Amino acid sequence: MRNSKFWFFIGLCVVAIVAFCVAPRSTHASSVNQTNLVAEAILSNSSSTGTITLATSPGAGNYEVHYNLDLHTPCTTGQGGLQIAFGWTGNASRTETAGVWPLDSTNTATSFYTGDQSIHVASGNVTYTLTQSVACASGTATWDGNIYLIRIP
């Protein structure tokens, strides 16, 4: 009888280990601390290029903005480029623009663009603006990604 309980326990352990090992892993979003996640924006090449509110009055404090973009199809020809600008109010109105992400044909479908920006919010909203700074000469670049606002405790 003791032997059957032992093997039953071992079987449960094996099932738990296999379930953990073969469970699908989440994308980048899983690495974001969900407890401190204030806001998330899901982006695509059809996203608006105007100023978008990421978080409405998130409260005074320190935050990090994380962004990651994945290129699916580069421009057929030309020097396409995308910029992201973040806006917030610290001691004064602030804007930080990430560099230009090239969408040109020298990049491949495995190209990505990622970064972090530490900010201090005194009041107001946290915004972002997507700008295709350079249009493709031909073809349409396709991409998607995420922007996260994380409160730093």
Image (cartoon, rainbow, N blue to C red):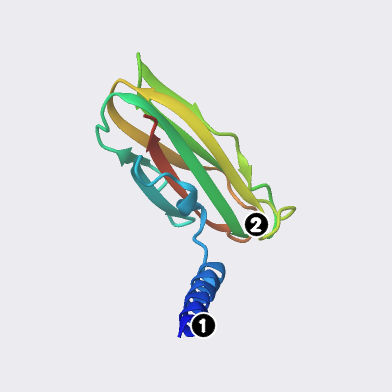
The residue carrying mark 1 is: 3
Of labels 2 and 1, earlier in sequence is: 1
Pointer 2: residues within 10 angstroms few (<14), some, or many (20+)? many
The residue carrying mark 2 is: 75
Quadrant where the C terminus sits is: top left
41 sits to left or right of 113 = left
**Residue 102: x, y in percent?**
65, 45
Residue located 30% across and 20% down the image: 122
**Residue 114: x, y in percent?**
57, 43
Along the line of sight, which residue is nearer the eye, 28 or 11? 11
Residue located 66% across and 53% down the image: 111
**Residue 35: x, y in percent?**
34, 43
Q: Which of the two discs, 2 and 1, sits closer to the camera?
A: 1
Pointer 1: residues within 10 angstroms few (<14), some, or many (20+)? few
**Placement of 42 over or under 51, stated as above or below:** below
Question: What's under tag 1, amino acid-wise?
Answer: Asn
Residue located 48% across and 40% down the image: 66
Along the line of sight, which residue is nearer the eye, 41 or 150? 150
Q: Do the residues labelled 2 and 1 touch (CB within 8 Å)?
A: no
What separation in Å lies between label 2 and label 1 (alpha carbons)? Answer: 65 Å
Indicate the secondary structure of the residue bearing disc 2: loop
**Res. 81 visible in picture:** no
Residue located 34% across and 33% down the image: 126
**Residue 59: x, y in percent?**
26, 28
**Placement of 4 over or under 50, stated as above or below:** below
Question: What's under tag 2, amino acid-wise?
Answer: Cys
Along the line of sight, which residue is nearer the eye, 71 or 63? 63
Q: Which residue sits furthest front?
A: 1
Q: Which residue sits furthest right?
A: 106
Quadrant where the N terminus sits is: bottom left
Indicate the secondary structure of the residue bearing disc 1: helix
